[in-house]
Amino acid sequence: MAGKTMKYYKSAKGKKSYKKKLKKDVERSTSKEGLKKRAELKRLRRKLNAPKGKDVSHTKNGVTLKSPSKNRGSKNDTPGDKRARGRKYKK
């Protein structure tokens, strides 16, 4: 089941945005920084003997193994996660 964003990208209105997103994703993942980051994560996974289905999570206390769904961002693991989520306003 596709989420809201993917539904938008698949619609006629969002196809141009989706192509732009894919292009940016490729640029980001093939840049020197992106390649370096992926290599570091692979190295950590091997070092930690991460079982299948676990991701390496960067937290305040170093690196730990988490399930991919839990590794989507935590409200209290890193300050970047809090900033990325935005603020909740009172209604």
Image (spheres, helix red, strand yellow):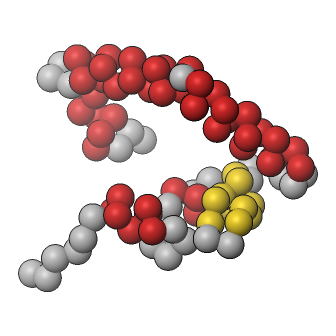
In the picture shown, does residue 11 fall above or below 41?
Answer: above
Give the x, y percent position of residue 19. Answer: 32, 17
Specify whether 27 is left or right of 8: right
User: Front-most of 32 and 1?
Assistant: 32
| Residue drawn at point x = 68 percent, y = 72 percent | 61
Give the x, y percent position of residue 49. Answer: 90, 51
Residue at the front extreme? 32
Q: Quadrant of the N terminus?
A: top left
In the picture shown, does residue 17 fall above or below 70?
Answer: above
Specify whether 8 is left or right of 51: left
Give the x, y percent position of residue 37. Answer: 64, 38
User: Front-most of 39 and 21?
Assistant: 39
In the picture shown, does residue 41 fall above or below 54?
Answer: above
| Residue drawn at point x = 28 percent, y = 34 percent | 7
| Residue drawn at point x = 24 percent, y = 23 percent | 17
| Residue drawn at point x = 73 percent, y = 40 percent | 40
Tell me the quarter of the picture where residue 33 sits: top right
